Image: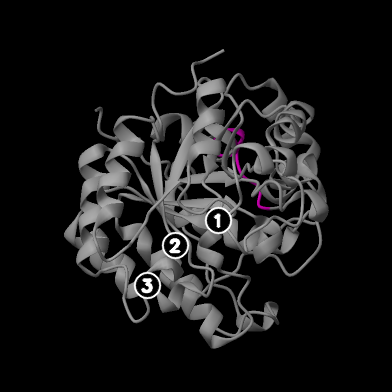
Amino acid sequence: MTRLSTPPMVVRVKPIRLPLSLFPHNSNPSIPFLPFPKKSHFQASAAKMASSSTKIIDSHLHVWASPEEAADKYPYFPGQEPTLPGHLQFLLQSMEEANVDGALIVQPINHKFDHSLVTSVLKKHPSKFVGCCLANPAEDGSGLKQLEHLVVKDGYRAVRFNPYLWPSGQQMTNEIGKAMFSKAGELGVPVGFMCTKGLNLHISEIEELCTKFPSTVVLLDHLAFCKPPTNDEENEAFSNLLKLSRFPQVYVKFSALFRVSRKPSPYQDLAPLLSQLVSSYGANRLMWGSDFPYVVPESGYKGGKESVSIIAGEIPLSSSELEWIMGRTALELFKGQWLPS
């Protein structure tokens, strides 16, 4: 299988450190926040995106069975029944209305390790969707074989590590975790980390795995759950996120903005974070993701997508940088999956 390649870096000028007094919500001067022009550049950014031929790719969403499908063929995992609709037709309709061309489907917890529903969607729409399976860290090692089967036989192109599924007291750096992380590198599939309880809790595990297995590409879901910092702990988390850019295999999903913003849509308080992420990683290591269907009651699917252009306009980012974030990074990372228009 073709190994993943890291695209050339997009060079950005590093932010200037300014007096802390200018930024009342940033208590740590080691995390510089940039000022932004008062005039919004949303219209210009949106126009640039509209004229671009680069496909729009959603790097993070979910799909699960409708209640009828669950009763008939694709049951929910007990206790994980969804509280909002996330069936395929709803997803396809939402993507069409928002002019999104393709997406990475992340196996939902609603079906846990039963990938049959997502696999059926991938087979129905092979040119539209890429699959990210869910790693099974069972102590018997069965998850390693399952991972290889899902990648080799069913065509999944990424795998998610949910640290809260590891046996009690175990970390992602245990024998099973290292074996699966190493296997992902051998198979050429990225590993996505879900740090719901905070990056600081898992930073040492991620650093150890990246150091020991440099050929395994890493995706940090939802900005590694870093919110705009308001205290020392949050400053440390965002600083750790920026420092992970030293590992060339690490990418960041600018996704589920409603989960990390402290403001309603269009989440403009994330502009300083995006600016610094682009400075540290380059736009070609950042990817937009919606977190459908959870985004729908927050901003609507289309609104979630449009928020990125508004945020980018506050910095402002160049049209090329916005293209990388909205699709080109995913196109490069999963080469051959979404063919050019």
Instruction: From the image, tell me which residue sits under label 1.
Output: 109
Residue 204: x and y in percent read 31, 74
Q: What residue lies at 71% left-to-right and 53% top-to-bottom? A: 294
Of residues 100 and 231, the one nearer the viewer is: 100
Give residue 336's mark: none
**Is 299 rendered above or below residue 27?**
above
Which comes before the other along the chain, label 3 or label 1?
A: 1
When asked about the image quadrant of residue 222, the answer is bottom right
Given the current orientation, which residue lies at the most extreme top position? 341
Identify residue type, mark 3.
Ile
Which comes before the other along the chain, label 2 or label 1?
A: 1
Q: On the picture, is 310 further left or further right than 250?
A: right
Instruction: From the image, tell me which residue sits under label 3.
Output: 203
**Is 91 rendered above or below residue 232?**
above
Identify residue type, mark 1.
Ile
Identify residue type, mark 2.
Asn
Given the current orientation, which residue lies at the most extreme front position? 72
**Is 135 rendered above or below residue 154?**
below
Marks 3 and 2 close (CB-CB < 8 Å) = no
Q: What residue lies at 25% left-to-right and 46% top-to-bottom? A: 145
Give residue 162's mark: 2
